[in-house]
Structures are given as C-alpha cells and as structure tokens.
Image (cartoon, rainbow, N blue to C red):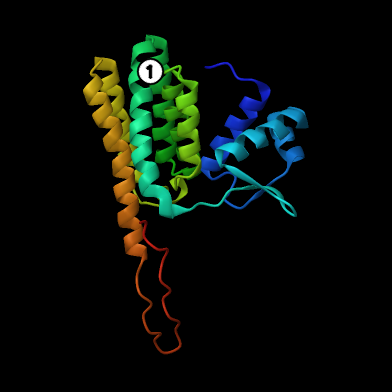
Amino acid sequence: MDFMTKEEYVADFLREGILSGRFARGMRLKQADIAEQVRLSITPVREAFRILEAEGYVLSETHRGVIVAPLDVSSAREINELRVLLESRLALAAMDNMTPGDYAGLVEIEREFEKADARNDREAVRATNYRFHRQLYVLARQPQTLRFVQVLWAKYPFDLINLIGGRAGRAAAEHRRLLKAIRAGERKAAVDALRDHIDTGWRELRAYLEKQQTPATPAGPGGSARRPGRAALA
C-alpha cells in the first residue's frame, strides 16, 4: 500500500465512497460526520475536501456547504477516451514494478469484487472495483498521471453503469483477462484487455441509456403516460 498523509487517506476514503454510491451525487458532506467515520480530527477532513474539490468530486456551495458534485454525462465519451490513454500508461508502468506480492494483492481484491457481485451488493462492487484499479495504478509510481485519472473518474458515470444488469459479472471476467496478461508479462495483451474493459463499459452504458430514451406513450384509461428516460450520451 502506498504511503498516505492523513488528508490523502480521507480523500481516498471519500473518493471510494462517492464512486461506490455510499455518498450520493448531490449529498451534503459534513466535516464532523466524516471525521467520526475515519476517526480523525476535522483538520485532515477539511484538507481532503479541498483536494476533492480541485479534482471535481465535491463542490463548495455558499448555503449548503460541501456537496458531492453532480454528473455531466455529456462529456463521458471524451473522458472514456482519456481513460484508455492514461490508464493503459499506468498499467504498463505497474507491470514493470510489480512483485509477486503485489500481484497476489490484486487477485485478492478481484476475489472480493466477485464475492460482492455474487451477493448482489452493488455498493461493494463499485468500491472494490475502485480499489482494484487504484491499487494497480499505484504500482506504476506515477502520481501525477494517477491524479489526472482520479479527476477523470470524478466525472465518469460509474453509478449509471452499475445499473446495467450483469455488468459486474462481465467486468469480473474482464479483470481476470487483464490479470492473466499481467501474470504472463504480455504487455500488448494487458493493454488490449484494459482497453476492452473500459470500452465495453462505455458501449454497454450507451446501449442502456438508448433503451431508456423512449418517447412518452399515450395514457390508457385510468393510467398515466410513460415518461421518457434519461437522454443518451453524446
């Protein structure tokens, strides 16, 4: 595990909580509540809020305090392309630095991911997915690139992808393919696996949202009109 200051620890705790859905979009975050959860003073929590505001995970509003930032799904296509570029770079660098113990740690996180999927715990699925990718990229020892990736994650609609039936099971298979390539030292296969993993989530999200974009139908007797779903991504 990489060394973290107290504020970095709190920031990572909040990132995972936001991406897992434990802290919902638009939810107000209170310093005292977070400090109690992480068993630290308010000072590192306040500093963590500043870090996350700079990354785009939270917003500071005059009358509401700090809230979890809402999503702008219209930018997801560009973000997806940037994720492929930067995360591939980190995965390759991680392979250069990875020890057998590091690899075993990734395998264990993947097992936790699959167990969470088996019990249909969506919050845990998203939390362990975050830990899997972050732990892999930490091994790259490229903190600036990782910081850019975390900014992209703040703006990516992981919560919508989580609504897609069977997506977690397919993601688990994609993780295993990536791990297999890493273990074999096959750099191209690892990049291909990671790219397909990210792109598949994007394609499934587009398909899901297109299904939701259904024109309203006339109401039947005693019924109500069906409302159109969320607009598809650009």
Residue 130, x across and y down, in percent: 47, 33
Residue 21, x across and y down, in percent: 54, 45
Mark 1: which amino acid?
A: Ala
User: Of residues 66 and 179, which is closer to you in this image?
Assistant: 66
Q: Residue at x 73, y 43 (%)?
A: 30
Apparent side of residue 2 relative to residue 195 in the rendered image (left or right): right
Residue 47, x across and y down, in percent: 70, 31
Q: Residue at x 66, y 35 (%)?
A: 50
Count of picture labels? 1
Vertical position of residue 199 compared to residue 208: above or below: above
Residue 128, x across and y down, in percent: 47, 33
Apparent side of residue 13 relative to residue 114 in the rendered image (left or right): right
Q: Residue at x 41, y 66 (%)?
A: 229
User: Of residues 202 and 40, which is closer to you in this image?
Assistant: 202
| Quadrant position of the C terminus in the picture | bottom left
Q: Residue at x 26, y 22 (%)?
A: 180
Q: Which residue is mark 1?
A: 94
Disc 1 element: helix
**Quadrant of the rendered image containing residue 158:** top left
Q: Give the crowd class for mark 1: few <14, some 14-19, many >=20 residues within 10 Å.
A: many
**Quadrant of the rendered image containing residue 48:** top right
Check the image and name the residue furthest to the bottom: 221
